[in-house]
Amino acid sequence: LHADVSIQALQAGKHVFCEKPMALTIEDCDRMVAAAQGADRHLLIGHVLPFFPEYAYARQLLASGQYGQLLGGTFKRIISDPLWLEDFYQPDRVGGPLVDLHVHDAHFIRMIFGMPNSVISRGRLRGDAVQYCATLFDFADSSYAVSSICSVIDQQGRPFMQGFEIHFEQATLQFEFNAFADGAESVPLKVLTADGQVLRPDLGDGDPVQAFVRELQEVVSAVTENQQSKVLNARLARDAIRLCHCQSQSVTTRKPVKV
């Protein structure tokens, strides 16, 4: 419903803040972008991941240039089978693991590295949806080495995990979080420096609600200051959906897919 409801609101003269994923198809994403342009209204998509402290810290280091140029990274996001969602694997309803789950990392990759030229993905299907996907992203900048893993496992003992390892010229960032059936385990964010140090940044109390607070503050600022959000803008969200579909196509055809 995201596309039609958002377009109706935009045409009624309202700014729109829409939850991720932006839409199920790239065509609907493009309709939404065109409607926002035509109405001269803001369309913001709720990609909250960049506001979580570990991801926000990575963005901060990138902006500062403290550890030199960005070189690449690997991103993981895995859940157990969401048995409560009967239509999770239906492309025309929820979209499956890539569009609903990996879209978080696709958006973050797009935001910090830019848009890749192509993707090559391998994985397993469940019906018409990709259940497991490992991807290499090919960029015009040959110094980038970027990969991701997104999947659903059939075992319920670990409902959720996410993590990354991001490489700069002079440092590596490492983070992982696992939610198990018997409790959570985390590898807190660390900065591994060129001189052998292991730095453990203070990221506050880690309350996940604060990420959503910061996301909403970003929405308010974009509207009141009439400035395009660098994180929540619709074109980034549209590109993330594009990446997800290209990865799905690559899994299905077992060929590289141009973005």
Image (cartoon, rainbow, N blue to C red):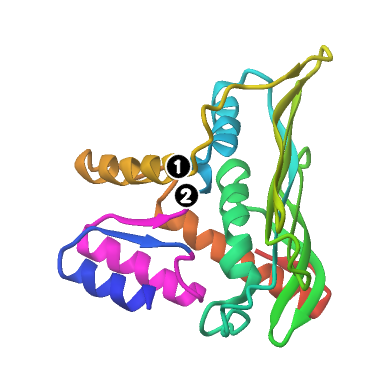
In this picture, is 198 found above or below 225? above
Residue 211 disc label: 1
Residue 166 x, y percent position in the rendering: 72, 36
Residue 130 disc label: none
Foreground residue, 189 or 27?
189
* Residue at image location 59% in from the left, 25% down from the top: 61
Image position of 97 (left or right of 7): right
Secondary structure category for the residue under label 1: helix
In the rendered image, the quadrant that contains the N terminus is bottom left
- Residue 15: name its quadrant: bottom left
Foreground residue, 176 or 83?
83
* Residue at image location 55% in from the left, 46% down from the top: 111
Foreground residue, 186 or 163?
186
Image position of 92 (left or right of 199): left
- Residue 251: name its quadrant: bottom right
| Residue 244 appearing in the image | yes
Residues at marks 2 and 1 touching, judged by CB atoms closer than 8 Å = yes
Nearer the observer: mark 2 or 1; the answer is 1
In the rendered image, the quadrant that contains the C terminus is bottom right
Foreground residue, 222 or 199?
199
Image position of 14 (left or right of 80): left
- Residue 41: name its quadrant: bottom left
Residue 105 x, y percent position in the rendering: 62, 53
Residue 87 x, y percent position in the rendering: 56, 84
Secondary structure category for the residue under label 2: loop
* Residue at image location 33% in from the left, 67% down from the top: 34
Q: The residue under label 2 is which amino acid type?
A: Val
Which label's residue is closer to the chain start, 2 or 1?
2
What residue does disc 2 label?
48
Q: Magenta residues, as a range? A: 21-48
